[in-house]
Amino acid sequence: MVMAITAPLQPVPLRDVSPVALMRARAVADANCLRALARAALRDGAPKPQLRAGNARAAAHRVLAHARCMSVLA
């Protein structure tokens, strides 16, 4: 089986991306990190894992909600 080597995707220059899109992309990345933190909290063996995981998930929700509100205002 021969696999074709494809060209890597070219990144979009930041000057071509709207500030709202950058803000929302950052919010999604932050929310993903918080969700990963919630998953880790359930497995790390530290005290009160359910509480810490819930707090991390709630923070992810707030980050996304804030970005959504800010993108409407922008």
Image (cartoon, grey):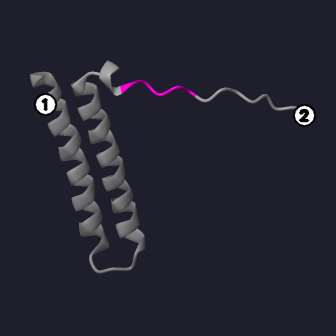
Q: Which amino acid does label 1 sit on?
A: Met
| Residue identifier under label 2 | 1
| The N terminus: image quadrant | top right
Residue 10 in magenta stretch? yes
Q: In which quarter of the image is the C terminus?
A: top left
Q: Which residue is drawn at 61% across and 30% down?
A: 8
List x then y, in percent, for residue 59: 21, 53
- At 33% from the left and 19% from the top, the residue drawn is 16
Q: Residues within 10 Å of mark 2 (few under 14, many from 20)?
A: few
At horizontal 32% and vertical 40% (from top left) the residue drawn is: 28
Residue 25: image location, x then y, percent = 32, 35
Task: Residue type at mark 2: give it.
Answer: Met
Q: Earlier in the sequence, mark 2 or mark 1?
A: 2
Q: Is the magenta stretch mostly helix, strand or loop?
A: loop
Secondary structure beneath label 2: loop
Give the extent of the magenta segment. 9-13
Q: Label 1 belongs to which residue?
A: 70
